[in-house]
Amino acid sequence: MLHPYELAIALRHIRSRSRNRFISFISVISMTGTALAVAALIIVLSVMNGFEYEVRNRILQVVSHASVTGLDGHIGNWQSLAAVALADPEVRAVARFVDGQAMLVGKREIRGVQIRGIDPAAELATSALGDLMVEGELTALRPGGFGLVIGRTLAEQLSVGPGDDLIMLVSQGTATPAGVVPRMRRFTVVGIFHAGMHEFDRSLAFLHIGDAQRLLRFGEDVSGLRLAVRDPLQAPAVVREVANAWGEGAWVSDWTREHGNFFRSIQLTRSIVFVILLLVVAVAAFNIVSTLVMVVRDKRGEIAILRTLGASPAAIMSVFVCQGAIIGLTGTIVGVAAGVLGAWNVSSITVLIERVSGFQFLAPDVYFISELPSRLLWSDVWQVAGIGLILSLVSTIYPAWRGALTAPAEVLRHE
């Protein structure tokens, strides 16, 4: 059983004000090391969680949860496929689309883009593209109007804005007496969107599906259907059920397959970072071992006196276990508080550092997003705090055991 005098002695060792002030100093160092390691692990895990969450949400704002496309890139009876998809209770909405590749000729630049013919009303029901518009409206795309909605980065590269014209060239050629020449058409920019992901903002252009069918010579066919499901995590199973129910040959895909390697790399990086920082926490926690070993050696005389007064080895061991536990608990609590505050404010802190130093932490053309996001999960906080406490307690066992084995007669003989 733990008695009050054991806890009092442990606290006295930590707050030593006599000649042993050095012991108090290294106790503070142990607490600080544990706090910094715990805080760093919480902040890094929150940033990794935020990065994955933010990228996933931004991807799902532009790409479909799932899609069904024709084996040859065309689907003629898309109405029957749409009816089958909407009959599935897990499907929230469907939208037909036409995909293709093109070149946009601006005032100063020529850029290759992916063009996507859409039905604006259906697109608003299946994606959040309407919320990403920064200039103009998605509904400005009308059949025969040859309007174009492009990303903000692409608009800056081509030096165009709403109302400006662009020349679009597609790979399907037109036969002339002089040979085959690329098909081209003048389009007017009617809107600009900003997804916050460089990949989409610089290489994606939307036009009305009727104009895309005419330009790419699809007739009444479409490339496929985009599906919006109620639970995006169930998209792989839902799209397969829809394709099987339709019964005709088609390619199926979903957001986890199109960007699966990217999210798997995030999870792998998160696991590696967690293990590395966990080793830092372990090093900080095991620093308590050296602290307690020094205390045991310095307090051998006091230990011998306590033993002669009737203290048991278990009581002596409890003194040093309490001391190590106090150090570990204090460091963990301070680290959790600092980590939580840092995770909540990491975006503001990084913005301030970028403004002062002029260094950008995340280049948008490499990391998809330009700001450092953070998403604090309390499950991570409790896990890190629990690991820190366990490692701190484990670190006290050996020094406490050595202190309990102190022989009073031998020690007092040399005092």
Image: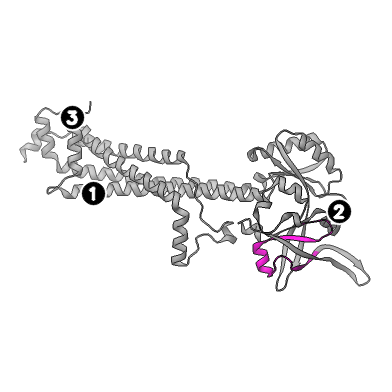
Kindly identify which numbered label has been placed on residue 218: 2
Q: Quadrant of residue 144?
A: bottom right
The C terminus sits in image quarter: top left
Side of 320 where 408 appears, left or right: left
Question: For the residue labelled by badge 1, is the local secondary structure a helix, a strand or a loop?
Answer: helix
Amino acid under label 1? Ile
Q: CA distance from mark 3 to mark 1?
A: 25 Å
Q: Position of residue 180 (x, y in %)?
A: 88, 67
Q: Which residue is mark 3?
A: 313
The N terminus sits in image quarter: top left
Examine the structure image and report whether residue 154 is included in the region drawn in magenta: yes
Residue extent of the magenta highlight: 141-169
Q: Position of residue 152 (x, y in %)?
A: 65, 62
The 10 Å Cα crowd at callout 2, few under 14, some 14 to 19, many 20 or more, is some
Amino acid under label 2? Phe
Q: Position of residue 183 (x, y in %)?
A: 84, 65
The answer to whether residue 131 shows anywhere in this view is yes
Side of 142 where 407 appears, left or right: left
